[in-house]
Every structure is written in structure tokens, then in C-alpha cells.
Image (spheres, helix red, strand yellow):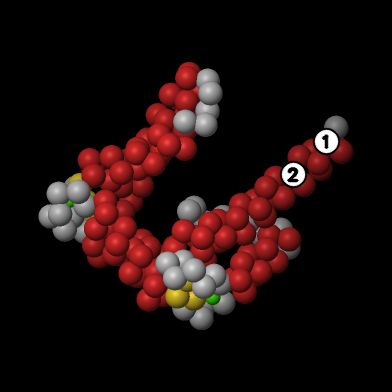
Amino acid sequence: MKQVLTLTLLGLALLSAQAASHSTATFIAEQDLNGDGQVTLEEFKLSRQLEFARMDFNGDGQLSEAEYLGEFEGRLMLRLAKIADPEKRREEQQRQMRQAKVRFGVLDVDKNGSISPEEFMASGLRMFKLHDRNQDQRVDASDLKLAEDESKAGKTSFVAP
Ligand SMILES: [Ca+2]
Ligand SMILES: [Ca+2]
Ligand SMILES: [Ca+2]
């Protein structure tokens, strides 16, 4: 019994280890606009601005909840297409959409019902800081290495992508 528990804990530690370095790797893959394997702060700010503009369908400079959720749902449907069981797919869709609604509420710091460019950038910068573990204003292989080391040491520092 004790052995089973130890194995389970080990499994969980490994999972969170992979999660932390995996999320930094994903961050670099998604935000590295010029393909040099690193994301500088300036590059990230630009990428975040472009993302905002892409999501702002009606171009009024604010992200409404419908715009935010609509954009997310579009990407989600592509990902969920892999799930063969329609029942499971529907459940996962509902779960993810609930989480997206919660995220919208968190992003909308002043609770005026829309995300401003400043609110969107602020949340992006928080995420950038979490990935930039050595605080040199760029996320690159050394931060990835630090994430992996942290995980091996058993620290959990999962950063949501
Ligand atoms: Ca808008
Ligand atoms: Ca707002
Ligand atoms: Ca760094």
C-alpha cells in the first residue's frame, strides 16, 4: 500500500515537472515570431498586441466577452476534434468554456465587462515574468533549463499556457 502511494506521488511529481518545462517550451514555440529560439520582451509585447488585434473582431479596441470566448471556442473545437467520443467531447468543451469564462473575469481587472489592451498586456507580462526565470527580459533555453532543474528538485511551478 505504501509502495503504491510512493509510486503515485512520484508519478505526480514527474507530471508537474513535465508540465512546468513543457509550458515554457510551448510559450517559446508560440511567441517566437522571428524563429531564433528565444522570445524577447519587445517581441512578446508585439506578439501580444497582434493577438489582441486578431481577437478584437469589431475593431473597437476592446475585447468583449463574446469576442474572447468566440476566439477561444474556435481554437478549442479544432483541438477537441481529436476526441472521438461525442459525449466526452461535449463534456470537455463545456469544461473548457467554463474555464475560459473565468479567465475572462480575471483578465477584466476593472470589471467593466471588456478587456482593454492594458489589461490584456498586464496579464501577458505576468506570464512572461513567470517564464523568464532568470529575469533577463528574454525567455530562452536557459529559462527552459531552469524550469527543468526546478522540476527535478521537486518544485512545482506550473504556468498555464
Ligand atoms: Ca472588440
Ligand atoms: Ca476591463
Ligand atoms: Ca530569461
Circle on res. 11: 2
Residue at image location 56% in from the left, 77% down from the top: 134
Tell me the kind of residue under disc 1: Val
Circle on res. 48: none
Q: How many marks?
A: 2
Q: Is residue 37 rendered to the left or right of residue 156? A: left
Label 2 within 8 A of ligand 3 by Cβ: no
Is residue 82 visible in the rendered structure shown here?
yes
Which residue is outermost to the front?
35
CB-based contact (under 8 Å), mark 2 and mark 1: no
Circle on res. 4: 1
**Residue 26 horizontal/vertical position (percent):** 53, 57
**Residue 107 horizontal/vertical position (percent):** 31, 54
Q: Nearer the viewer, residue 19 or 34?
A: 34
What secondary structure is found at the residue carrying circle 1?
helix
Query: Can you say which quadrant of the picture contains the N terminus?
Result: top right
**Counting residues from the N terminus, which is met first, the one under dot 2 or under dot 1?**
1
Vertical placement of residue 123 versus 90, above or below: below
Vertical placement of residue 155 versus 67, above or below: below
Judged by depth in the image, the label closer to the viewer, 2 or 1, is: 2
Q: CA distance from mark 2 to mark 1?
A: 10 Å
Q: Is residue 12 rendered to the left or right of residue 35? A: right
Residue at image location 51% in from the left, 60% down from the top: 29
Vertical placement of residue 65 versus 147, above or below: above
Which residue is outermost to the bottom?
136
Is residue 132 visible in the rendered structure shown here?
no
**Residue 73 horizontal/vertical position (percent):** 35, 38
Tell me the kind of residue under disc 2: Gly
Where is residue 99, by image quadrant?
top left
Q: Nearer the viewer, residue 106 or 48?
A: 48
**Residue 118 horizontal/vertical position (percent):** 25, 65
Where is residue 145, by image quadrant?
bottom right
